Amino acid sequence: MTDVAARATAGFRSAYGQEPAGRWAAPGRANLIGEHTDYNDGFVLPFALSLRTVVAASVQPGERWTAWSETTGQPVEFGAAEADEPGRVTGWGAYVAGVVWALRDAGYAVPGARLAIASDVPLGSGLSSSAALEAAVLAALVDLGGLDLPAERQPRLAQRAENSYVGAPTGIMDQSAVIRCREGHALFLDCRTEAIEHIPFDLDAAGLAMLVVDSRAPHRHADGEYASRRKSCEAAASVLGVPALRDVTVAGLAPALGRLPDDETRRRVRHVVTEDQRVLDTVELLRAGRVREIGPLLTASHASMRDDFEITVPEIDTAVEAALATGALGARMTGGGFGGCVLALVEAVSATTVADAVTRAYAERGFTAPATFAVLPAAGATRLA
Ligand code: GAF
């Protein structure tokens, strides 16, 4: 397959019969650690992938937006009326219309535009293909319109597109990661203050590799389960009288759990509170250059998602178990859950052995074969030359 930027450009030419004014790219992301902590005002540590979504685009007259995607080969068209009413544009076009809506709602004069979209980010695999699309479209519209919207304010706006136009109640992690990450680094984000720190994450120097296992498991009720986890957390914070679960510390966890009404809520809260601490501990180790020591924290995070937050599925747990049994230093599901991908931190020399072991374990259990590939921390959204 040709390079994704070339595909976006070729798509633009064939859909619109002209050259695009420019091309903008945004990556997918993997979250190293800190799951379901973002909407609890907590901490996350994602990194961007070299898999990217590219939007080739030009201004078109009037308040009209036309978006062509290589996935469907069909253009989606909408005007100001559809953009201004959340829910009017549906399917993948909602992510494009949502960005136009969020910009207009914030008072920006958004230029009409023609867009052509190509992507290497696997769809629906928990690697933030939707945030990549939002961020690439946003970067294109901001540049084409000369809009005054600095990078640090873009994640919130892209998140509004997803929450209010598309209707998915996600947190701020994915949009922050795909916009603000830096090559060779993980992004330490405080989701309450939006303060960031780029944490060096040099796998090569440590002789390590990060293996991604795309479980290819069908997402099972992911949207409803995500929303219900979020509701439980918010209800628990309200019982505890704190603005968000971020305000419960590990030291204060035992008394907090004693005040909660049922075992399920206690387990949800325990996940979030201990996960925030695991992010802080991981950051400390990375700051000290002790990359290989983060393995146990990753594995503990997985156990917490499996047993306390209950967001894993058999394919995901199988990948983690097989990776650990073959010598991975740590392994965990990444992303919202109920399918998606596993990250396994492995010795670079044993990446293939671990990947083969996971593939064999899938075959033994009769699961669809997974996709496995190694990743390195890449840069966030950018305009291409
Ligand atoms: C999804 C959401 F979009 C994020 O905001 C985050 O909550 C994540 O699930 C879980 O950590 O990717």
Image (cartoon, rainbow, N blue to C red):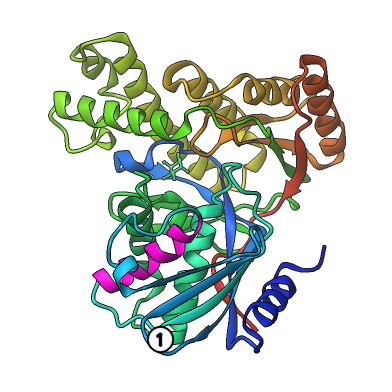
Residue 201 image offset from top left, x and y in percent:
62, 52
Residue 190 image offset from top left, x and y in percent:
36, 50
Asked where in the image residue 63 lies, by quadrant, the reply is bottom left
Asked where in the image residue 274 lies, by quadrant, the reply is top left
Position of 67 with respect to 314 (left or right) is left
Residue 379 image offset from top left, x and y in percent:
60, 65
Is 103 included in the stretch rendered in magenta? yes
Res 77 visible: yes
Give, as a single range, the part of the protein colored magenta. Answer: 92-105
Quadrant that contains the N terminus: bottom right
**Which sits in the foreground, 121 or 358?**
121
Is 364 included in the stretch rendered in magenta? no
**Which sits in the foreground, 232 or 17?**
17
Res 180 visible: no
Secondary element under disc 1, as helix, strand or loop, is: helix
Q: What crowding class fits label 1: few (fewer than 14 Cα within 10 Å), some (14-19), or many (20 or more)?
A: some
Q: Quadrant of ligand 1?
A: top left
Residue ID at (30%, 17%): 265
Which residue is label 1 attached to?
Answer: 145
Residue ID at (52%, 20%): 306
* Secondary structure that dominates the magenta span: helix
Numbered disc total: 1
Asked where in the image residue 28 lies, by quadrant, the reply is bottom right
Residue 40 image offset from top left, x and y in percent:
30, 38
Position of 246 with respect to 373 (left or right) is left
Residue ID at (40%, 65%): 97
Position of 277 with respect to 369 (left or right) is left
Q: Is mark 1 within 8 Å of ligand 1?
A: no
